[in-house]
Image (cartoon, rainbow, N blue to C red):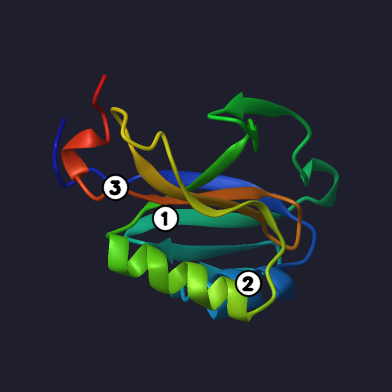
Amino acid sequence: MSATALFHLAFPVHDIAEARRFYGGLLGCPEGRSSEAWVDFDFYGHQVVAHLSPAECGHRATSQVDGDDVPVRHFGAILPMADWEALAARLQGAGTRFIVAPHVRFKGQVGEQATMFFLDPSGNALEFKSFADMSQVFAK
């Protein structure tokens, strides 16, 4: 696979202005092209597109991962540890309600990682994680 390949994800939101405040403001993702019905964001170097589609919003199912109920449908980014810690602090400072609070899971095991889950204003689940050792991202 090419190292220059970019990821693209389209997801539903119930309010474009609220999506701009959350993704652009709180998460700091620069905005790209947009219309009244959708807006592109530079999501840590990848393109995500918030589409106005209220009936499609929200997460519905969870799955057990290392003792946490995590939303089955979610997306996010793997950040360098210092960036993950700064984001966790910013989200906590903003009063974000976490589904899974920032912590380290799989401690002492293959794939040890810092993780946190929370919802955007439209109920889409996001996970941000970090690895002290990036070689563990795909370790078995």
As shown in the figure, which amino acid type bears the numbered disc 3? Answer: Phe
Spatial distance from mark 2 to mark 3, Cα to Cα? 25 Å
Q: Which of 32 and 76 is in front in this view?
A: 76
Spatial distance from mark 2 to mark 1, Cα to Cα? 16 Å
Q: Which of marks 1 and 3 is nearer the N terminus?
A: 1
Q: Which is more foreground, mark 2 or mark 3? A: 3
Q: Is mark 3 on a helix, strand or loop?
A: loop
Q: Is mark 1 on a helix, strand or loop?
A: strand
**Quarter of the image with the N terminus in it:** top left
User: Which label is found at residue 22?
Assistant: 2
**What residue is at 30 percent from the left and 61 percent from the top?**
81
Residue under numbered circle 3: 131
Q: Earlier in the sequence, mark 2 or mark 3?
A: 2
**What residue is at 85 percent from the left and 44 percent from the top?**
55
Decide if residue 114 is on the left or right side of residue 98.
left
Q: Which of 47 and 35 is in front in this view?
A: 47
Residue under numbered circle 1: 47
Q: Which of 96 and 43 is in front in this view?
A: 96
As shown in the figure, which amino acid type bears the numbered disc 2? Answer: Phe
Q: Which is more foreground, mark 1 or mark 3? A: 3
Spatial distance from mark 1 to mark 3, Cα to Cα? 23 Å
Q: Earlier in the sequence, mark 2 or mark 1?
A: 2
**What residue is at 39 percent from the left and 63 percent from the top?**
84
Q: Which is more foreground, mark 2 or mark 1? A: 2
The percent position of residue 78, horizontal first and vertical second, equals: 35, 50
Q: In the picture, residue 112 is in which quadrant?
A: top left
